Image (cartoon, rainbow, N blue to C red):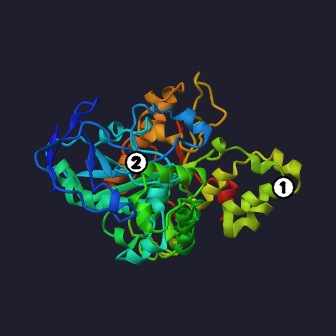
Amino acid sequence: MLLNVMTKYGAVEGVPSPTEGIAIFKGVPFAKPPVGELRWRAPQPPEKWEGVRKCDKYMNGAMQSKPKVPFYIDEFPIDYTKVTFGEDCLYLNIWTPAKSADEKLPVMMWIHGGGNEVGFPHEPEHDGDGLASRGVIYVSVTYRLNIFGFFAHPELTAESEYGASGNYGNLDHLAALRWLRENIAAFGGDPDNITIFGQSAGAGDVHTLAVNPLAKGLFNRAISMSGSGAASLMRTARLSDLEALGLEFQKAAGCSSLAELRAAPADFLFKLSEEKHFNFGTCVDNYILSDDFSNLIREGKHHKVSYMVGSCSHEGAAFGEGYKNSVGTFNAQVERMFRDYAEKAIELYGVKTDEDAKNCKRDLMADGAAYGTHLWALAHLEHGLDPVYLYLFDRCIPDRDGNPSWESSYHSGDLWYVHGTLGRSWRGMGPDDYKTSNLMMDYWTNFAKTGDPNGEGLPVWKPYTREEPGTMVINENAGMSDLLDNPGVKILA
């Protein structure tokens, strides 16, 4: 077991994982703390240190509040007395099964979800043991969120060397990848075989890296989980709009300049942004993004690496079905989900009356996600790129008593499965859940190793091609399907 490692910045000492043969390095700094004059600046390389840094505990999660959707407060229960949050949050957690530094194991860098507003890598559903035990190095990254990760302001743009502001959370991901390229070999990893993967907003961040020119050559494969592919629900804003919002925030804060904002206490800024509902997100800054990342992917302007893209069959279960109140709200949701294909989708659903809307059994968020992933695959074919591996997570997740739950394969439910953390869930997981989880971890780690998810004893997963436009349906009876019963796929056929 590799417990002592010398990085470019200093020596680190890890701790044994509960799984035999795996070492964990918790809280390894990949950048300077983004505080004081470094608040709202691109991440800077960490300071070197003397002696040995003991990496035996998780560091701060990014500044945030509790999740805003009640379902997720119950689903992923967090003891907030045992978790700390703060601006000083730019740390990696590394699980390595290497016995020496010369093993050149594949590396998987995990980007958590949460709308780029909440979330942290050491939530109960996340853990690296299950994936690392399959011969990869698992790395999870903490990055700046909300007002600290995506704030834009004209003065920030003017002072920046690259003529833009905002997107600091995205720049954190870039800095983490650069750190891995420089240091992961010392942990037994292969810097030339790095897979980025993320879920929900983390999948959106994967998309951003996929089209970020500064990320070229920093990773070799990418997995997007429930990020809606080439028609993502996570739209990118214009820099000018976020700069204007930044000026509004400055006024609300009672500050006369950027300098005063930088000097303000972090708690004050965060509470103000929450109370006044200031929402900052990824923007088109002409530095890391020249357009909405969905548009760039559809134009074939993303990095030429291997891709696996998928979603869940009941993505919208946890978010309610208020859009089914009337034909008007239903069609508005269709337009939001299907963009350019909205007219065709409205015709396909055939909802003509309020009663039709109330009785519709389809999950529009799930259909829209499948539509987005298939658009990505079609873009690859159109631009002559390597085929994409598509999947649909379709395991009916059980309730507390082990019976089929009403929410089934809901958005984020796959996190328990891909991380092998079913035992941490309060749900009554059974043999079919563990079978699905093992299948998923095998597919994901095989893809990280070779760019192909297939392996001995696994149902054959074929890439999406014109001849065979198939999707791997992942559950206890996994197999390929054309998914033509899904309106989100059928409108593209």
In the image, which disc is placed on residue 451?
none
Residue 220 in view in this figure: no
Task: State left or right for residue 176 relative to residue 287.
Answer: left
Q: Quadrant of residue 351?
A: bottom right
Q: Is residue 329 above or below residue 166?
A: above
Tell me which residue sits at (31%, 68%) in the image.
217
User: Residue 85 at what x, y percent from top left?
Assistant: 40, 43
Foreground disc of the pair 2, 1: 1
Residue carrying label 2 = 444
Residue extending farthest left: 51
- Comparing 329 with 129, the one in front is 329
User: Residue 3 at what x, y percent from top left?
Assistant: 16, 39
Query: Label 2 amino acid?
Result: Trp
Which comes sooner in the sequence, label 2 or label 1?
Answer: 1
Task: State left or right for residue 26 relative to residue 229.
Answer: left
Q: Is residue 15 above or below residue 191?
A: above
Q: CA distance from mark 2 to mark 1?
A: 40 Å
Residue carrying label 1 = 327
User: Residue 223 at what x, y percent from top left?
Assistant: 43, 55
Tell me which residue sits at (43%, 56%) in the image.
264
| Quadrant the N terminus occupies | top left
Tell me which residue sits at (30%, 54%) in the image.
33
- Comparing 250 with 424, the one in front is 250
- Comparing 81 with 374, the one in front is 81
Q: Are the residues at dot 2 and dot 1 in contact (C-beta closer than 8 Å)?
A: no
Mark 1 neighbour density, 10 Å: few (under 14) some (14–19) many (20 or more): some
